[in-house]
Amino acid sequence: MVTIFGIIILLGITVVLFGYFYGSRHFVVNERTLYFDDLPEAFDGYRILHFSDFHAMAFHLGHEEDVAKIVELINSQHCDMIAFTGDIVTMKADELNGFEETLAKLSAPDGVYAIMGNHDYALYMRNYTVGQRLADIKDLHRRHANMGWKLLLNDHDVIHRDNDSIVIVGVENDGTPPHFPQYGDLPKATKGVEDGAFKVLLSHDPTHWRRSVIPDTDIQLTLSGHTHAGQFKIFGWSPVAFVYDEWSGAYFNTKTDEQNERNVKQTLHINEGVGCVPVPMRVGAWPELSVLTLKRK
C-alpha cells in the first residue's frame, strides 16, 4: 500500500514538472479553414491569428523569455489580423510590467484587436476597494492603448477591402453568474452595424455563444477563450468537458431566419490559450495559437 501511494506521488510530481518545464512552453500553431456562404468576396482567404488567455502573472515565474517567443511566432504567421480574446492578466494590471514593449511588437496589416476577460477586472484582488478596482481597470485600458492594441469595449470596428467590409465586434466579459461577471452588451456593441454585414465577434467566455449570440443575433463567427482546455488534455478529452459543452476548437450551428427567409450558419472558435493559471503548467492542452482562414463556400 505504501509503495502504491509512493508511486502515485512520484507520478504526480513528474506530471507537474513535465507540465512546467516542457508543457507550458510547448507552443503550437493550429490551422483551421472556416467556410461561410456570405463572406464578402474580397475577404475570401482572409487570415486571423486568434490567441487568448495570456495571464501575464505566470510568465513572471521563470518564463519571461517565452513572451518574445510568442510574439515572434505570431508575427511569423503573417496573418491579416490578430484577435486576442481576453485575460491578458490574472490579478491586476501591473503584471504587464516588463512585457508591454515586447507585446507592442505584435503586427498585422489590419492591427491587433482585443477584449476584456473575467481576470481583467481586478475582481480577484479581494482586498481592493471599488475605487482601486476601477483604477486598475483604467490602467489596463491605458496599457492596451500603449501597446497599440485596439481594445473593444462593447463596440465595433470595420475593416475594408476594396468595396467589401467585415465588422469586428468586441464585448466585455459575459460569463455565467455568480462566478464570472456579465458586462457584455451585444446590442450596444452592434449598434449602427448594417443589416447583413459579415460580423466577427470577440467574446471571452464561450458560454455566451449559446446564451445570447445564437438566439439573439445573426453573427457569423464568434472567437472565444477562457477554458484553457483545463490545461490538461489526453486523447482529445479534458475534464473541463464536464463544465463546458464547448471548450476547444470549432463548433457550428445553423438556424432559420424566417423574417429574411434564409438559413444562418454560426461558428464558434475556442482558443486554448497561451498562458496558465494559477501556475505555468500544461499537459496535452499545449499553449495554442490559432490561424483561421476564412473562405467563401
Image: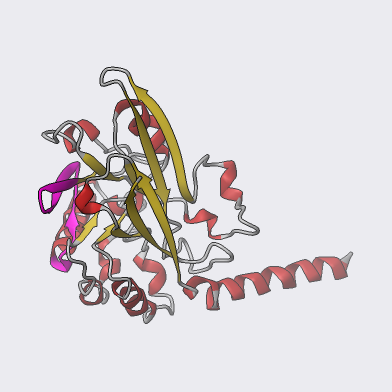
Question: How far across and how far down the image is residue 79, in percent?
Answer: 28, 65
**Is 158 on the left-hand or right-hand side of 6?**
left
Residue 181, placed above or below residue 28: above
Residue 18, compared with residue 263, is above or below; it is: below
Rendered location of residue 235, percent (x, y): 65, 58
Query: Depth check: 96 or 203 in front?
Result: 203
Quadrant assignment for the C terminus: top left
- The percent coordinates of residue 296 (x first, y second) are 31, 47
Identify whether 91 is placed above or below 57: above
Is residue 118 rendered to the left or right of residue 114? Answer: right
Stretch of the chain drawn in magenta = 146-166
Quadrant of the rendered image containing residue 32: bottom left
Check if residue 155 falls in the magenta segment: yes
* Residue 130 coordinates in the image, percent (x, y): 23, 45
Q: Is residue 36 visible?
A: yes
- Which quadrant: the N terminus? bottom right
Residue 230 lies in magenta, yes or no?
no
